[in-house]
């Protein structure tokens, strides 16, 4: 029979699931510690004048360039300070002109014998005082102009806004944080090792940084800070990413830091083949007629290499790479591939 009725009677295609052969292979083994990503270059930009925030121009996550305006603070008080300084400069210059004229007049009178030398000395002292007052007024004017410039808060360098700390209408004050900016090109991993494990760094053949996605990146350089925290008895270890990996993540993301000290044979399976249900870890093992679910006991994760299996599997068995599809009714295994 042909037509739609025949199509409805035909069985649907059974899912074919890719499988991988379980085998032992060499992987790096050592000690692992929790770590986190942090920005090697981060700045908390603070206000330097008093006043209400009239405008905030950035949000967390925005890209900024050096000199870009982050926020503006009410500058009316600063403008008044500039006006006062300008008036003070004008007054000081007027007094300087008056003192200069008085000194010249006194000098002429002394030369003609109509005025004592003490009067000339007093006129000269007044002139010097007027010159000093002018310099002081000019310096105050520069300070007032600088304070007016501080009403505009700008980014110190190209980067990303990590957080903002003030909203429009909030009161800014000298030292109060406005925004935090960091350079995304300088991300590093930081871990804290117990003081007893400092030798793990010295003995390491390499240091792997395992990102939250499971991706593994070999650290380009490792620096152990010389001090030990008095309360936690840990040392801070800073790990720099290779130049080819400038954007490994964002500050605060958790990572695993593995200090690889040797290579050993371990039974490794792909991480995506593992089915986790609460406390149960299981895989779908290929059979002649389909798949069967089997509980396994797993050990350490090895990043992109996979997950170590301690019990439940033997070399040569085949497991489903996609456990979700393998659990469908009628699923059957494809030809096995050897996991590299």
Image (spheres, rainbow, N blue to C red):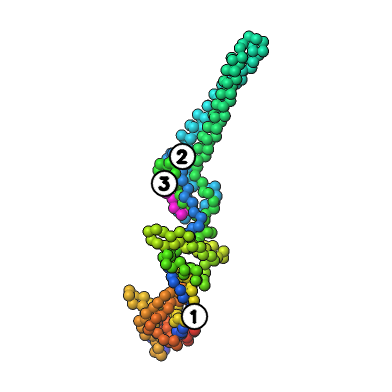
Q: Is residue 114 above or below residue 157?
A: above
Closer to us: 305 or 61 = 305
Q: Residue at x 50, y 41 (%)?
A: 150
Q: Which SS class for mark 2?
A: loop
Q: Residue at x 46, y 70 (%)?
A: 200
Q: Nearer the viewer, mark 1 or mark 3?
A: 1
Q: Earlier in the sequence, mark 2 or mark 1?
A: 1
Indicate the secondary structure of the residue bearing disc 3. loop
Quickly name the residue at label 1: 26
Find the magenta span and give its range.
161-168
Which residue is at 40% across, 41% downward?
171
Q: Report which quarter residue 35 is drawn in.
A: bottom left
Decide: marks 1, 3 in contact (CB < 8 A)?
no
Which numbered tag is attached to residue 10?
Answer: none
In percent of width and height, residue 127 lies at 59, 21
> Residue tagged by mark 3?
167
Q: Position of residue 284 (x, y in %)?
A: 39, 82
Foreground disc of the pair 2, 1: 1
Q: Which residue is mark 2?
A: 49
- Is residue 242 in view? yes
Pointer 3: residues within 10 angstroms few (<14), some, or many (20+)? some
Could you tell me which quadrant the N terminus lies in? bottom left
**Are circles 2 and 1 on residues that touch, CB within 8 Å?**
no
Which residue is outermost to the bottom? 288
- Tell me where residue 9 sits by quadrant: bottom left
Using the image, determine if residue 332 lies above or below residue 72.
below
Q: Earlier in the sequence, mark 1 or mark 3?
A: 1
Alpha carbon distance from label 1 to label 3 = 55 Å
Asked if marks 3 and 2 touch (Cβ < 8 Å), the reply is: no
> Mark 3 or mark 2: which is in front?
2
């Amino acid at each position: 029979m042909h037509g739609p009725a025949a199509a409805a009677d035909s069985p649907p295609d059974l899912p074919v699931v890719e499988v991988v052969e379980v085998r032992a292979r060499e992987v790096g083994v050592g000690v692992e510690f929790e770590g986190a990503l942090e920005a090697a270059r981060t700045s908390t930009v603070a206000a330097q004048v008093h006043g209400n925030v009239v405008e905030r121009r950035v949000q967390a996550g925005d890209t900024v360039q050096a000199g870009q305006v982050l926020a503006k603070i009410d500058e009316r008080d600063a403008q008044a300070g500039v006006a006062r300084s300008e008036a003070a400069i004008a007054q000081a210059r007027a007094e300087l002109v008056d003192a200069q004229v008085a000194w010249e007049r006194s000098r002429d009178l002394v030369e003609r014998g109509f005025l004592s030398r003490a009067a000339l000395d007093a006129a000269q002292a007044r002139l010097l005082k007027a010159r000093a007052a002018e310099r002081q007024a000019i310096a105050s004017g520069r300070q007032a102009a600088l304070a007016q410039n501080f009403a505009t808060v700008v980014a110190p360098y190209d980067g990303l806004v990590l957080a903002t700390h003030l909203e429009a209408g909030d009161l800014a004050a000298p030292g109060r944080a406005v925004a935090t900016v960091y350079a995304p090109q300088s991300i590093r991993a930081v871990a804290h090792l117990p003081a007893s494990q400092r030798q793990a760094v010295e003995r390491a053949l390499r240091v792997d940084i395992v990102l939250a996605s499971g991706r593994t990146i070999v650290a380009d350089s490792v620096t152990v800070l010389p001090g030990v925290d008095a309360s936690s008895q840990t040392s801070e270890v800073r790990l720099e990413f290779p130049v080819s990996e400038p954007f490994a993540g964002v500050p605060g993301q958790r990572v695993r830091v593995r200090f690889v000290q040797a290579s050993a044979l371990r039974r490794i399976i792909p991480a995506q083949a593992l089915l986790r249900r609460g406390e149960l870890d299981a895989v779908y093992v290929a059979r002649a007629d389909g798949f069967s679910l089997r509980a396994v006991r797993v050990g350490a994760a090895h990043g992109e290499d996979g997950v170590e299996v301690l019990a439940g599997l033997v070399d040569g068995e085949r497991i489903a790479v996609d456990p979700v599809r393998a659990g469908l009714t009628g699923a059957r295994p494809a030809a096995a591939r050897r996991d590299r």
